[in-house]
Image (spheres, grey):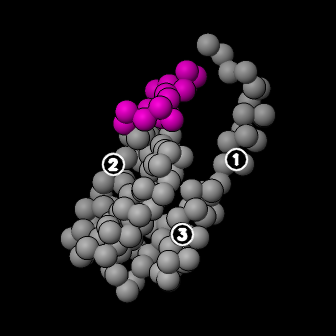
């Protein structure tokens, strides 16, 4: 199947996808702030440049997009029909990089929490309440 957009339009569409301050991130940040948690954003001194860092709790939160991070078994992770090999390779490298970052963070005694985009689309309240217990443990 060919792409429905020409190269220029597809390139523009892809360039407009944000890497930070996304809707899922803002949902989590507002919830944390409302509940009295203070945090740092996109902290570049730690591996993986975590979306949210809670230094007081030695906790890091990554908010991963299901497509970009290859969320297995998720309906939002669909392999594109064009340039399939390129996309699979890109997502595979992202997953490997994520795993390496989580390993380094765990070895340095950081509590790394991953929240998937789809978790914030369904049962938001349940996931955010679980986040509190994940931070406090």
Q: Name the residue under label 2.
A: 96
Q: Is residue 66 above or below residue 85?
A: below
Q: Residue at x 63, y 56 (%)?
A: 23
Please say whether residue 112 is visible from this viewpoint: yes
Q: What is the secondary structure assignment of the residue under circle 1?
A: helix
Q: Which residue is drawn at 58% across and 22% down?
A: 82
Residue 60: name its quadrant.
bottom left
Residue range corresponding to the magenta coloring: 72-90
Question: Sequence order check: which comes first, mark 3 or mark 1?
Answer: 1
Q: Which residue is drawn at 73% across and 40% down?
A: 13
Residue 128: name its quadrant.
bottom left
Task: Measuring from the top left, give residue 29's x and y in whole percent.
Answer: 55, 70
Q: Is residue 96 above or below residue 13?
A: below
Task: Measuring from the top left, give residue 135's x and y in whole percent.
Answer: 34, 72
Q: What is the secondary structure assignment of the residue under circle 3?
A: helix
Residue 126: name its quadrant.
bottom left
Q: How far apart in space, not on screen, are marks 3 and 2 (Cα)?
A: 30 Å
Query: Which quarter of the image is occupied by the N terminus?
Result: top right
Report the mark closest to the observer, 3 or 2.
3
Question: Sequence order check: which comes first, mark 3 or mark 2?
Answer: 3
Residue 129 lies in magenta, yes or no? no
Q: Mark 3 points at which residue?
A: 31
Residue 90 has which mark?
Answer: none
Task: Measuring from the top left, give residue 64's x and y in whole percent.
Answer: 47, 53
Prevailing secondary structure class for the magenta stretch in the rendered image: loop
Question: Are the residues tagged 2 and 1 within 8 Å (C-beta)?
Answer: no
Q: Residue at x 41, y 64 (%)?
A: 129
Q: Name the residue under label 1.
A: 15
């Amino acid at each position: 199947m060919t792409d429905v957009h020409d190269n220029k339009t597809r390139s523009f569409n892809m360039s407009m996808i944000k890497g930070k301050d996304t809707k899922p991130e803002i949902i989590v940040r507002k919830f944390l702030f409302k509940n009295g948690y203070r945090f740092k954003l996109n902290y570049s001194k730690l591996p993986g440049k975590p979306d949210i860092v809670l230094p007081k709790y030695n906790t890091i939160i990554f908010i991963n997009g299901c497509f970009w991070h290859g969320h297995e078994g998720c309906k939002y992770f669909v392999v594109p029909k064009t340039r399939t090999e390129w996309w699979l390779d890109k997502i595979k490298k992202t997953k490997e990089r994520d795993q390496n970052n989580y390993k380094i963070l765990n070895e340095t005694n950081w509590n790394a929490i991953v929240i998937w985009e789809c978790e914030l689309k369904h049962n938001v309240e349940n996931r955010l309440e679980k986040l509190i217990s994940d931070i406090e443990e």
